[in-house]
Image: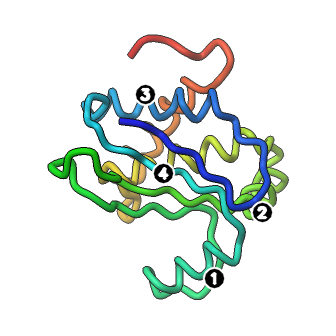
Amino acid sequence: MKLTILKEVPCRAPVAGLQDIFAHVTRMESAAAFSHRVNLIFADNRRLRRLNREFRAKDKATDVLSFNIDGLDDAGGVFGEVYISVPYARQQAAAYGGTLRDELLRLFCHGLLHLFGYDHKRSSEARVMESLQERCLEHSRPGGRRKS
């Protein structure tokens, strides 16, 4: 699989960390060898609000949205897209006392896990997803990279 990063708004993308998370998740899901692409799009609140309204019937901005596009049987297709609102991420980073870099990585990991079918609607699902998310984020931290 290949990660493509697109910027609709200016931001300093933590490319190495994003690639580390992507590699870890695709290995974990046995999808690394597929010829598909995942698009990561850094956007603004207006774009996320429009997508949220159109596809989830929620007329408000949000931090991250994920959409599966092509199945893994469709060779060379776009497996999915992850949209991150950079302004929303910036606000959350400030509220959590973290950095924008860490928040962008967290949101990407969260969205990527959704593409592979993980969810958090029930508390049991949330525990599994949060645990996987934390393990994946370890791979993006300095000194945290290790073989999976």
Residue that badge 4 annotates: 39
- The numbered mark, 2 or 4, whose residue comes first in the sequence reads 4
Secondary structure under tag 2 reads helix
Real-space Cα distance between discs 1 and 4? 22 Å
Q: Amino acid at mark 2?
A: Pro
Could you say whether the residue bearing mark 4 is in a helix, strand or loop?
strand
62 to 11, vertically: above or below: below
First in sequence: mark 1 vs mark 4: 4
**Label 1 sits on residue:** 60
Q: Earlier in the sequence, mark 2 or mark 3?
A: 3
Q: Earlier in the sequence, mark 4 or mark 3?
A: 3
Q: Which residue is labeled 2 in the image?
A: 87
Q: Which is nearer the eye, 35 or 119?
A: 35
Q: Position of residue 81 (x, y in %)?
A: 45, 57
Q: Earlier in the sequence, mark 1 or mark 3?
A: 3
The Cα atoms of the two marked residues, 1 and 3, are separated by 31 Å
Indicate left or right for 24 with 63 as reference.
left
Viewer-nearest of discs 4 and 3: 4
Return the mark for residue 127: none
| Cα gap from disc 2 to disc 1, whole angstroms | 14 Å
